Amino acid sequence: MAHARISANLPPNIDPTKAPIAFGRRALPKLNEELQSHELLTQQRALMALCDLVHDPEKIYQAVELGFLDNLKTLLRHHDNTVRQKTTEVLYIMATHSIGRQGLIQNGVISALAELLDDPVDICRKNTHQTFEMMAKLPEGRDSFSI
């Protein structure tokens, strides 16, 4: 007689670090809600998905308009190393585009990022320095370093 056996392992084609995201216009608002979640894993997954989405300048524009930068500034002071790392990575990717650099300047992200220059996590410091380098390429960015 055959017995059903249920494995505790996830299927091999499912990545637990990837968040299921909504499609179309609902994707970024849903991620913005998840960034504000009190559950650590939800925040981490949202940041992973956001890292993939912000390579598109249109998504960066939408993210700035939806108020992502205020949530990301808050996450820069998070106690979890992974959250801080992915937050600085999102900000760096956003800073590689002109729209993102202008959004970072207008929302005062530079002063919040400056607090991470002494972060104990190497990759956070690296992403912060890379973001500052990208910001310095804009004349407005250079002027905003008078912290």
Image: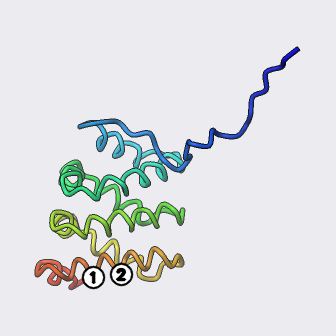
| Residue 143 placement (x, y as % from top left) | 14, 83
The quadrant in which the C terminus is found is: bottom left
- Real-space Cα separation, disc 2 to disc 1, in angstroms: 6 Å
Element type where label 1 sits in the image? helix
Q: How is the image coloured?
A: rainbow
Residue at screen point 40% across, 49% down: 35
Q: Nearer the viewer, residue 117 or 53?
A: 53
| Residue 11 placement (x, y as % from top left) | 63, 38
| Residue at which label 1 appears | 133
Element type where label 2 sits in the image? helix
Rate crowding at label 2 as few (under 14), some (14 to 19) or many (20 or more) other CA atoms within 10 Å.
some
| Residue 120 placement (x, y as % from top left) | 53, 78
Residue at screen point 44% across, 62% down: 86
Q: Which mark is residue 50?
A: none
Which residue occupies the extreme top position in the image?
Answer: 1
| Residue at which label 2 appears | 129
Rate crowding at label 1 as few (under 14), some (14 to 19) or many (20 or more) other CA atoms within 10 Å.
some
- Is 103 rendered above or below residue 42? below
Rendering quarter of residue 1 = top right
Report the amino acid beneath label 2.
Answer: His
Asked if marks 2 and 1 touch (Cβ < 8 Å), the reply is yes
Which residue occupies the extreme right position in the image?
Answer: 1
Report the amino acid beneath label 1.
Answer: Glu
Rendering quarter of residue 4 = top right
